[in-house]
Amino acid sequence: MNVRLSGVGSYLPERVLSNPDLEKMVDTTSEWILERTGIRERRIAPDGVATSDLATIAAQRAMERAGISAGDVELIVVGTVTPDMMFPSTACLVQRNLQATGAAAFDVGAACSGFVYGLMTAASMISSGLYRNAIVIGADTLSRITDWTDRGTCVLFGDGAGAVVLEPGEGILGSCLGADGKGWDALMQPAGGSLMPATHETVDKRLHTIKMNGNQVFKFAVRAMANSVIECLDRCGMTRDDVNLLIPHQANTRIIEAAAARLGIPLDRVAVNIDKCGNMSSASIPVALDQAVQSGRLKRGDVGVMVAFGGGLTWGTAAFRW
Ligand code: ACO
């Protein structure tokens, strides 16, 4: 595949929601949250700010670093589970905000794996010669679909966005995407779609918020992340020793540590930002990538491996040379 990542950017809303703040909202303790998840605080977008707003700023930062102007953008792909609305797509709203009038735009639905799925979709479209560049964004405002009365989930999530610019060149080395629809009900937002349209009852029962089977997702995540990285490295003819930085989806520190242990990759080669950001779904990986690049942890020429898992169930790995 002849596609490189030419720029990366991210954006986090300013407002911090800390564990002590959550102690005042539900029956929990800061210690429980930190010990069981690794999360200390997360960011929350202000009222009236939507996923497309976060996505637009992240995209602008990535474009600036890649040195590409809005008029030259040919494709915009957004991975999200919290689109501004059911339709139009969030990607179209970002296209309008950027005034990227020449760009095709669409969203990818793969839950927390949305950024990696979007990355490989756009990379394939560049590799085939259809497009000369693309902006791929992972953006989520999970605070809007969180049940703030459910201590089992509300402590986990945060808001944010990350973006990369793709252009022809050497960079993406290989990937491994997968899905298991049998696990569809392990992680979902049940109401608001064609199966269960919004009614007074769905609102009363909080069915427009995230429902999950935490233990089932936990076990699946460790297995899927490790297996998918192993298969991706295999396809690339690489081993774990070639990986300078593993950039996993940030759902729980214990999941990250267990997957890294299975892979035999030491934690000093694993990007972790869950303590400050919580789980931002599609945004977690590109935000962690941006932070690793800006801090000098991932340097030009280094090999990075992103690995995601999420609702669907889905998983996805992409290996690249930065
Ligand atoms: N504070 C205090 N106690 C709590 C809290 C809380 N916030 N949440 C749950 N508990 C309690 C439970 O009620 C339970 O009590 P009980 O033993 O009296 O019944 C006890 O803690 C243990 O609960 P478990 O669910 O077994 O706790 P576990 O160690 O499995 O941690 C967690 C739960 C953090 C949710 C974990 O299972 C996990 O991280 N799962 C994966 C989640 C994930 O990856 N989700 C992806 C979501 S992506 C998306 O939705 C966009």
Image (spheres, rainbow, N blue to C red):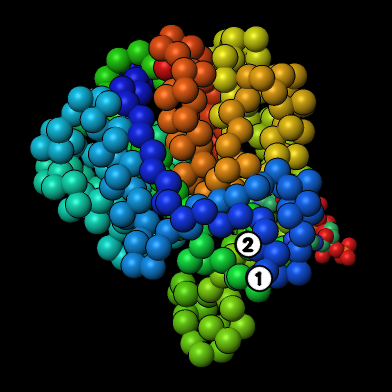
Residue sitting nearer the eye, 162 or 217: 162
Circles 1 and 2, Cβ within 8 Å, touching? The answer is yes
Q: Is residue 232 visible?
A: no
Residue at x 58% of width, y 37% of height: 273
Answer with the quarter of the image where residue 290 lies: top left
Q: Residues within 10 Å of mark 2 (few under 14, many from 20)?
A: few
Q: Is residue 306 above or below residue 154?
A: above
**Residue 174 in the figure: left or right of residue 216:** left
In the picture, the quarter occupied by the C terminus is top left
**Residue 128 in the figure: left or right of residue 115:** left
Residue 240 image offset from top left, x and y in percent: 65, 14
Q: Is residue 81 above or below residue 291?
A: below
Residue sitting nearer the eye, 89 or 18: 18
Report the image quarter containing ligand 1: bottom right
Disc 1 target residue = 25
Answer with the quarter of the image where residue 164 lies: top left
Residue at x 61% of width, y 83% of height: 205
Residue at x 66% of width, y 56% of height: 19
Q: Secondary structure beneath disc 2?
A: helix
Q: Which amino acid does the dot numbered 2 rest on?
A: Asp
In the picture, the quarter occupied by the N terminus is top left
In the rendering, which numbered label is found on residue 21? 2
Residue sitting nearer the eye, 229 or 286: 286
**Residue 185 in the figure: left or right of residue 296:** right
Q: Rounded to the nearest whole Å, what is the CA distance between mark 1 and mark 2?
A: 7 Å
Q: Secondary structure beneath disc 1?
A: loop
Q: Is residue 26 visible?
A: yes
